[in-house]
Amino acid sequence: MKSHFNSKEQTLPRQSSEKCLLNTKMKKVNAKHLLTVAVCGLALASCGGGGGGGGSSQTQTQISANPISVNIYAGSRILSSTNVPFNIPVIVVYINGQPVRLLFDTGASGVLVNQGTFPIPQSAYTSQTFYGHFGDGTVFSGTVANVQVCLTSASTDCINMPVAVNSKTSGTNAAFPTGDYIVGDFGMDCGQNTFASAGSTNIIVNTFCPLYYLWQQNQYFNAYSLSFYPLSNTYYATPGFTTPIGSITLGSFSANNLISYTGNGRDPYVNANYNNSLARITIYDIGSNYINLTNDVLSAEIPYFNIYTDGYNCSVSNWIQGGYPISYSIPLANSSSSLTISFTTEPPANMCASILSSVSANNPVIVKDDARDIGLSIFEAIMGLPEVINHNFTWLLGSNGMVQYISIQ
């Protein structure tokens, strides 16, 4: 989820010799904006709070070299919040022994979780604070703490790591208000766009994605795979809260069709080519509810595109009508070949009533190939859950523990 952040830390003045990369992103539902943050680059362990988690009060057990699989579920959001209550992927992890429901998010890096969700001893808190807001205007702020995060209920699948503990949990502009079904964000793009950032003179924290800390414990964990199950109604489904819609597996993988996905210090992205030789930065971000396409991409893909005639699907002004084919190509790494990806916008208008009635009842709803026009102000395309759900993905780390490649099947 795209966000604007600031963070503060009481010590750790920036040294001129420390190499840090600027410009990154996070995400929040359908409103995304670029942001600027600073996090440590290649010399991660030399930057404050990094290494194996910066001194969690929990004992770190040795992680064995076996794959770890975790289910993804469909969630919802309280209707009083500003967030759209469908296409919400949820993961359940255990933090300091407590099960916690978080938004599973491939457009951010690190863990953001509401204060009070699980017990945190005072000694686990650091001096590092953060604050920021998502593109929809909701805000978060708090203090970084070192905690134990278990990817399953098994004690062998646990890591000690710093997380951003959010104390802004009330008010109409709270990102994850008290009473919401999910209580934070599980960021797994594994880039350098973390929930914590820096002021003009301070290096702040290394709240990187959980895979990074697994990799530090055992470099067998150099990748994760991501896949989803077919939807029961072809292009939409209304699964229960406890019915898995997909899964991730963390481990060691090799993959074909490698695509460079580094971002050079900002959120990871690919340079995709659309019709009429139109090139646009494209991001794979399942924390976004929609496929967010710029107006010029839609004009290149849909002949004589006009939002007044081609939008207003399900009576939503920027929701593109069903039935339009969209196609783009991505250059493969170390190759002159490209991967071409196509999808058709959904849903057909005659299914709007069924879908919207499920949303109104605040049930989990998944709608594939749901595309929106985000205008011309943001010159990037964001392939949210409705497009990612069509493929099997693999995220692969580079030698610095950050994402270097993805593979799309």
Image (cartoon, rainbow, N blue to C red):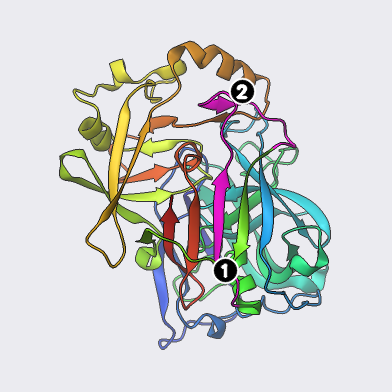
* Total number of numbered discs in the rendering: 2
Give the residue displayed 40% in from the left and 72% down from the top: 21
Give the residue displayed 39% in from the left and 27% down from the top: 345
Q: Position of residue 325 (x, y in %)?
A: 31, 29
Residue under label 1: 252
How far is disc 2 from disc 1 in space, using C-alphas? 38 Å
Residue under label 2: 359
Q: Earlier in the sequence, mark 2 or mark 1?
A: 1
Magenta stretch, main secondary structure class: loop
Question: Tag 1's secondary structure?
Answer: loop
On the picture, is 404 further left or further right than 83? Answer: left
Q: Position of residue 280 (x, y in %)?
A: 27, 48
Give the residue displayed 56% in from the left and 31% down from the top: 84
From this viewpoint, is residue 107 visible? no
On the picture, is 276 further left or further right than 326? Answer: left
Q: Amino acid at mark 2?
A: Val
From this viewpoint, is residue 122 visible? yes
Residues rendered magenta in the picture? 219-243
Q: Position of residue 210 (x, y in %)?
A: 62, 65
Tell me where residue 57 sits by quadrant: bottom right
Q: Position of residue 100 (x, y in %)?
A: 75, 51
Residue sitting nearer the eye, 354 or 42: 354
Q: Amino acid at mark 1?
A: Ser
Furthest toward the bottom, the residue is: 17
Label 1 packing within 10 angstroms: few (<14), some (14-19), many (20+): some
The vertical placement of 111 against 158, above or below, is above
Q: Is residue 225 on the magenta stretch?
A: yes
